[in-house]
Amino acid sequence: MTDAELITRTRAGDPDAFGALVSRYYDACWRFAYHMLGERSDAEDVVQESFLRAYLAIGRYDERDQFRGWLFRILTNQCRNALTSRGRRTRRFVQDEVALETAAAPPSGLPLGVEDAALSRALAQLDPQQREALLLKYAEGLEYTEMSRMTGVGESALKMRVKRGVERLRAILGPIDD
Amino acid sequence: MTDRDVLPFPAPDQDDADIAARIAALYERTPATEARQADRCARAVLAQSMHQSSRSALGVSRTRWWWGAAAAAVLITATTRPWRGVVSTQEADSAVGRAIAAATLSGTVTPSDSAVRFDLTLPTSASAVAIVGDFNGWDQNATPMASRDGTWSANIPLTPGRHVYAFVVDGKRWIVDPLAPQVPDDGYGPANAVVIDGGPQ
């Protein structure tokens, strides 16, 4: 069943249709929120809040938009709100890093290697705007046009954030062996 | 116009392939969540949407959250014996208050001492809504609710004491409050009814 069909059914009051939409996009949303916020529980909260807002606003959803893009627009806003309202996250990221590096074995379901842990740590040290731009560009694989529509930020500014973010990552990670 | 025309540095896409690949790999290796996590999220959203004024869905004006809570307090008072006032107040503040606030987004009590008015506002359209409970033998044909301005209502004479109820939408969808601590699961299926406890335990 297509997104459009599920949305139509959701609007008609079919809770199973909405459940199907959540199942379809939960993973993608959670992954983005997790890398933005750095904590599983925070990511779960933000994703749930995003789906709630999407559900309450689904009457205003424009079918000309891709549902995923519309949902991610809500999600990115919720991630920003979470980062703003919960203050600086640096200490929490450090705690995650310590947990990763001192664990006798990789945490269940989180098979990150040394390189991934280093990159994860470096991403966590970025300015949230740079991290958001890098994730949308290189993890989600979006074009700048889509990113601009999603975030409300101009394309030039987004390119600058990606550029600065990459520079910062290189500085944190050090030389990369090819 | 190309990126090079706009920016004073090379286009990021071309020179950042190594970083891009590492980010993509990190992202892809993030483990998938458990299926039940998405299911739990969907259930929570549907339950929360009742709390968050379902009228805001589909562009309808928003209901105040405290209106449901106020209705709950009145409802509890109406079904409680006067000498059990302390008990009813405590419950309205906690378990029962939350349950009713979730299930009834607006509501009032009729002037009669023994009749209680149940109101239910749905986020989506429905052709028929009934209230079922221990007071009508869980018969979904016994007490149909009347619709007016998007709100379904029914006046039901209740004796003081403990009552269990649920709403049935279009003959098949049961509306309950999954967040209510006092949700019985014996005899009525899992989590499909809300308890109003205004009387003896």
Image (cartoon, coloured by chain):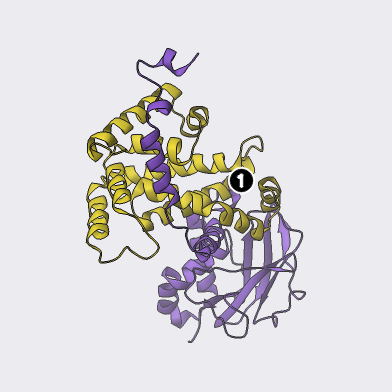
Chain colours: A yellow, B purple
Element at label 1: helix
Taking the spot 50% from the left edge, 54% from the top edge, the residue there is A27
Q: Picture coordinates of residue A69 (x, y %)?
A: 55, 39
Residue B90 location, quadrant: bottom left
Query: Residue drawn at (55%, 59%), measured in percent from left and top?
Result: B42
Q: Is residue B64 visible?
A: no
Which of the two residues, B112 or B93, is positioned nearer the viewer here? B93
**Type of amino acid under label 1:** Ile
* Residue B111 left/right relative to B28: right
Camera-side residue: B44 or A39? A39
Q: Quick check: A42 left or right of B103?
A: left
Taking the spot 49% from the left edge, 55% from the top edge, the residue there is B65
x and y percentages locating residue B138 in the rendered image: 69, 80
- Viewer can see residue A168: yes
- Which residue is more in the foreground, B121 or A10? A10
Q: Is residue A8 left or right of residue A140?
A: right
Name the residue that disc number 1 marks: A58
**Does A140 sit left or right of B170 as displayed?**
left
The answer to whether residue B98 is above or below residue A80 is below
Location of residue B169 with respect to B201 vertically, above or below: above
